[in-house]
Image: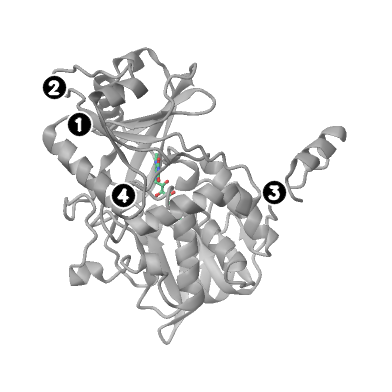
Amino acid sequence: MRYSLFSLARNALTGHRDWQPAWRDAEPKASYDIVVIGGGHGLATAYYLAEKYGLSNIAVLEKGYIGSGNIGRNTTIVRSNYLLPGNIPFYELSMKLWEGLEQDLNYNVMVSQRGVLNVFHSDAQRDAYARRGNAMRLHGVDAELLDREGVKKLYPFLNFDNARFPIQGGLLQPRGGTVRHDAVAWGYARAASDRGVDICQNCEVTGFRIENGQAVGVETNKGFIGAKKVAVSVAGNSSRVMGMAGLRLPIEAHVIQAMVTEGLKPIIPGVITFGAGHFYISQSDKGGLVFGGDLDGYNSYAQRGNLPVIEDVCEGGMALMPSIGRARVLRHWGGLLDMSMDGSPIIDKTPVGGIFLNCGWNYGGFKATPASGLCFAHLVATGEPHPVATAFRLDRFATGNLIDEKGQGAQPNLH
Ligand SMILES: Cc1cc2nc3c(=O)[nH]c(=O)nc-3n(C[C@H](O)[C@H](O)[C@H](O)COP(=O)(O)OP(=O)(O)OC[C@H]3O[C@@H](n4cnc5c(N)ncnc54)[C@H](O)[C@@H]3O)c2cc1C
């Protein structure tokens, strides 16, 4: 069923009783040409495999329900304000895909290009942001360096004269913004299912069957599923899942938390990140202030957070915008991140024939969803890396060709 004004009117007249489920909830078949593990980027991958590369006989296996992973847990921010040549074209491709995604998927994912502002608090930080902005503009990405008055015009309620962290200005990407996260999962699931992809929920991969160095399928809680190719896209579970194929990854699992307040009248038109600590904030269309900050400081697969990080995030919020102290937090949650050692992703073949890997998204893989899906589909379909994802190689950690966007070295807790 295509969504349109016409279908809305027709269903309104029949009391909204005839809407169909957005996608088929399939039971897995005995075998597929391609099995994609993970219902986040994996949904986008399956969609592009079918839509762009004309492939069929594909399944997405998700151990929970669609949207239960990070794709439904993030703070919805999208941007392409990167510095390094390995990253900028990839994230800008993603931004361009976001800009046309609702038409491509025939689904309202609520793309809202409300602007992403990174504030700075010192001369050195201003120079670093100016450099980043110049690198973006050289790649055709929008960037504006604002002085203190420019930031004040946008956000007069920030604490400009905080003695410790006075705001000197900010780097603005006007095309950055937010996208409704779970709608992205549902939109890709629906579009992939429409093109024949089987979406199998509550189907956990528990092992790989590998014969003579070549994957021939996966073991699951629903039995063995044969596959000519297996595409793994499981975020914080990457090390555990690839461990089942005998591979040790340069990835650590950390929890990151986010919080939302009660609904308030519109106050924050865009997205703001604090430059002197881990805190960022936007306002949802429902009115809740959505904010988050740093990782939990230890490795975990538990998908629940801790109080010290919440305290740290709230301290950042109070330093940047003291008025937030009056808002009441409604709920908070955690997601399991796949932290790579240089802060950049991996989209590559693995040493095991037929197994492909997509991981290392750190804090920021939601914004990458469309480009990640497209580039991973390209790799799985053609066996070659997509031109904008050639740097995301697994062996860069052995060869030293790191894409260290933040220049912080192999410290996942800093990315
Ligand atoms: C609190 C929070 C805030 C964030 N904020 C932002 C943000 O504002 N902007 C941004 O760009 N990014 C943000 N991120 C990061 C972003 O959400 C992730 O990087 C991105 O969603 C990762 O996509 P994915 O498809 O790899 O992971 P997921 O969406 O987690 O998908 C992986 C799926 O694999 C499934 N899986 C795992 N193991 C198995 C198995 N054995 N068998 C079958 N299925 C399995 C999981 O259940 C999961 O659904 C945030 C993350 C969190 C947690």
The amino acid pointed to by label 3 is Ala
Please state which of residues 269 and 55 is positioned toward the viewer in this rendering: 269
* Mark 1 residue element: loop
Give the labeled residue for mark 4.
137
Report the Cα–Cα distance between label 3 and label 1. 43 Å
Residue shown at the point (26%, 26%) measured from the top left: 316
* Residue furthest bottom in the image: 212
Give the labeled residue for mark 3.
22
Report the Cα–Cα distance between label 3 and label 4. 39 Å
Report the disc number at residue 276.
1
Would residue 332 appear left or right of 56 to someone viewing this image?
left
The amino acid pointed to by label 2 is Arg
The amino acid pointed to by label 1 is Ala
* Mark 4 residue element: helix
Q: CB of mark 1 within 8 Å of CB of mark 2?
A: yes
Q: Nearer the viewer, mark 3 or mark 4?
A: 4
Q: Tag 1: Cα neighbours inside 10 Å, few (<14), some, or many (≥20)? A: some
